[in-house]
C-alpha cells in the first residue's frame, strides 16, 4: 500500500501542471464495475449535482468514487518557466478516484486553466465510465 501511494504521489508530482488528463488503472482484474458510491471532498455543489445527474450512485456499493477539485494553485517548478511565459498555464485541477475497500482502483486527474466547469466534470466522468466499463 505504501509503495502504491508513493508511486502515485511521485507520478502526480512529475506530471502535474500539464494540460492533458492522466489516467492510472491499478486493478485490471475486474472487467465491469457494477456500481459506485459518491464522496465529494471537500463538498462541492457543482460536482455533486453534475455527477448525480449523470449516474445513479449506490450508497451501499463497495466501489467508492472520490471526486475533488482545487482552484488557484501555482506550479513553481523552474522547468515550467517557458510554458508559463508562453501559454495559459494551469491553476487548478479535477480528480476522480475510485477505491475498493480502501485500495486504489482507478484515478483520473486533469489540470485546469480556468475555473472548474460542468463540462470538465462531465468529460472526466465519461472518460472514467468508459475506462472502467461502468454499468
Image (cartoon, grey):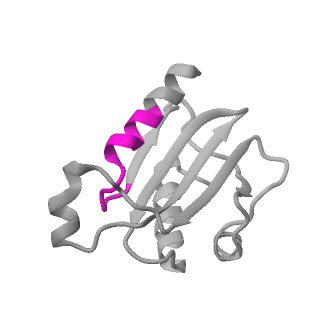
User: Residue 28: x percent and y percent?
Assistant: 49, 32
Q: Nearer the viewer, residue 52 or 108?
A: 108
Relative height, residue 130 to residue 5 (above, below): below
Dividing the picture into quarters, in which one does residue 18 lie? bottom left
Number of numbered labels in the structure image: 0
x 42%, y 59%: residue: 110
Q: Residue at horizontal 39%, vertical 42%?
A: 13
Residue 134 x %, y %: 59, 53
Membership of 18 in magenta stretch: yes
> Looking at the rendering, in which quadrant would you find the N terminus?
top right
- Magenta-tinted stretch: 8-21
Q: Reply above or below: 33 against 18.
A: above
Query: In the orientation shown, which residue stands out farthest toward the right?
Result: 60
Between 27 and 68, which is closer to the camera in this rendering? 68
Q: Is residue 51 above or below residue 2?
A: below
Taking the spot 37% from the left edge, 57% from the top edge, the residue there is: 21
Q: Position of residue 78 (x, y in %)?
A: 23, 50
Nearest the eye: 96 or 16? 16
Question: Is 41 above or below relative to 86?
Answer: above
Left or right of 82: which side holds 116?
Answer: right
- The image quadrant where one finds the C terminus is bottom right
Residue 75 at x, y = what percent? 36, 56
Would residue 128 be found to the left or right of residue 13 on screen? right
Q: Viewer-proximal residue, 119 or 1?
A: 1
Magenta-colored stretch includes residue 14: yes
Amino acid at each position: 500500500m505504501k509503495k502504491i501511494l508513493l508511486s502515485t504521489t511521485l507520478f502526480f508530482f512529475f506530471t502535474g501542471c500539464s494540460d492533458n488528463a492522466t489516467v492510472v488503472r491499478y486493478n485490471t482484474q475486474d472487467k465491469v464495475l457494477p456500481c459506485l458510491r459518491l464522496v465529494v471532498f471537500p463538498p462541492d455543489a457543482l460536482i455533486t449535482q453534475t455527477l448525480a445527474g449523470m449516474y445513479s450512485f449506490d450508497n451501499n456499493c463497495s466501489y467508492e468514487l472520490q471526486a475533488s477539485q482545487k482552484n488557484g494553485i501555482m506550479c513553481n517548478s523552474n522547468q515550467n518557466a517557458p510554458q508559463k511565459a508562453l501559454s495559459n498555464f494551469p491553476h487548478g485541477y479535477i480528480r476522480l478516484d475510485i477505491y475498493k475497500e480502501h485500495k486504489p482502483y482507478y484515478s483520473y486527474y486533469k489540470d485546469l486553466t480556468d475555473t472548474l466547469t460542468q463540462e470538465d466534470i462531465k468529460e472526466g466522468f465519461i472518460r472514467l465510465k468508459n475506462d472502467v466499463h461502468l454499468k
